[in-house]
Image: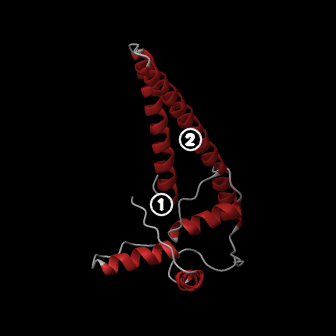
Amino acid sequence: MALISLRVSDQVAAEFSVLAATQGGKSALLRRLIADALAAPAPRILALPVGRPEKVTVRFRESEMRQLAEVSHQRGMTRTGWIVALVRSRLGSPVQHSPDEHEALRAIVRELNRIGGNINQIARAANISVLQGRAVELDLSVIQEAKQVIERELAQLRNALHGNADYWDGRP
């Protein structure tokens, strides 16, 4: 996805921020304005939450409270956190992750970063060898192993993201 940036005066930026706060945020408003200028259909843009949080009280029966305790515990969340995540997911907020999912995603990112660092070291060594006039010796088994690790981590990432989306969308 391309990035468009521009400079405007501080006053214009402040006025635009005030207007954008009522229109789903600055990026959302800019996307709509650009789409309108191009006479293209506007993409579905969800409004950003605005204002301070407010308290809502709901009442559940004892059996429902036990169910809430069970499902929230299974997700590693508090009852309140689970209810808030459920409501936000239905309102179109970004995907709601449990603490376990956050940790799993962090572990996947760490592993992919480690692999990226290894690939950079391999590329640097190959470039140095070429500059020194030496033949680059490739160990295909190491490359194949790295490929398998990357594929496994990407599969785990896809499973985590799809599982989370399915959960909050109410799909089994």
Q: Identify which residue is drawn at 49% across, 42% down.
A: 157
Q: How many marks?
A: 2
Q: Identify which residue is drawn at 55% across, 37% down.
A: 113
Query: The N terminus is located in which quarter?
Result: bottom left
Residue 49: x %, y % from top left: 59, 75
**Above or below for 140 versus 89:** above
Disc 1 residue type? Asp
Residue 59: x %, y % from top left: 69, 74
**Above or below for 64 versus 125:** below
Residue 58: x %, y % from top left: 68, 75
Q: Residues within 10 Å of mark 1 (few under 14, many from 20)?
A: few
**Above or below for 1 versus 127:** below
Residue 108 circle label: none
In which quadrant of the rendered view does residue 21 lie? bottom right
Q: CA distance from mark 2 to mark 1?
A: 25 Å
Residue 109 circle label: 2
Q: Residue furthest left?
A: 39
| N-term-proximal mark, 2 vs 1 | 2
Q: Residues within 10 Å of mark 2 (few under 14, many from 20)?
A: some
Secondary element under disc 1, as helix, strand or loop, is: loop
Q: Identify which residue is drawn at 47% across, 60% down.
A: 169
Q: Residue furthest front?
A: 132
Q: Identify which residue is drawn at 42% across, 21% down.
A: 131
Which mark is in front, 2 or 1?
2
Q: Are marks 2 and 1 in contact (CB under 8 Å)?
A: no
Residue 20: x %, y % from top left: 53, 81
Secondary element under disc 2, as helix, strand or loop, is: helix
Judge by depth and name the residue closer to the eye, 115 or 83.
115
Disc 2 residue type? Val
Residue 169 circle label: 1
